[in-house]
Image: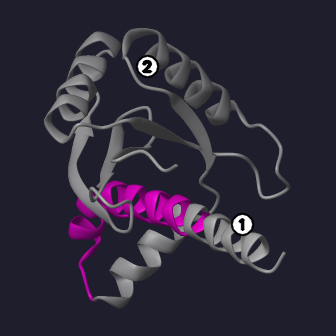
Amino acid sequence: MLPARVLAIDFGLRRMGLAVSDALGITAQGLPTLQRSGIRKDIEHIRAVVEEYSVQKILVGNPISHAGNATAMSQHAKDFAGRLESRLACPVELWDERLTSVQANRMLRSAGLSIGKRKQAVDRVAAVLLLQNYLDHYANQTERTNSAGGSL
């Protein structure tokens, strides 16, 4: 069963995009981008978001390579996810985020936003795409399971 709310984090060393699902786990809404200011402050900010939205699960974007291999940034994301999980009372999962930032930039460019405005919005939009991908994947898995169960 999908948790009531999921928080997605588009992990970065300077900024982190944040998005939260609606209570039904259908749509993703962007939250203000977190400007990194130290691991303790970052975790406290995320803890406040978890409490405010009653988050039951956290996804941390895993920036693996196009070939599916770990990268230096994916190790940073894994370390951050481990620290989050040890300090918060909800599960933390790494989720493949390949191309979310590229897709976010394309969307913002096609919307006619200036470079400056794209830079401000790209992390939030990438987090929304990451979370929506997860929600859609989960919905498709559930639909397949229900269809298979119904045909037996």
Q: Residues within 10 Å of mark 1 (few under 14, many from 20)?
A: few
In the image, taking residue 145 as reference, residue 133 lies left or right, namely: left
Q: Is residue 91 visible?
A: yes
User: What amino acid does circle 1 point to?
Assistant: Thr
- 21 versus 59 height, above or below: below
Q: How many marks?
A: 2
- 32 versus 131 height, above or below: above
Residue 145 image label: 1
Percent position of residue 102, x then y: 53, 68
Q: Quadrant of residue 94?
A: top right
Q: Is residue 37 visible?
A: no
Q: Residue at x 27, y 88 (%)?
A: 112
Residue designated by label 2: 84
- 19 versus 11 height, above or below: below
In the image, taking residue 123 as reference, residue 63 lies left or right, namely: right
Q: Secondary structure at mark 2?
A: helix
Q: Secondary structure at mark 1?
A: helix
Q: Is residue 30 magenta?
A: no
In the image, taking residue 103 as reference, residue 33 lies left or right, namely: left
Residue range highlighted in magenta: 112-137
Q: CA distance from mark 2 to mark 1?
A: 31 Å
Please identify the quadrant where the C terminus is shown. Answer: bottom right
Percent position of residue 72, x then y: 69, 31
What main secondary structure does the magenta stretch of the protein show? helix
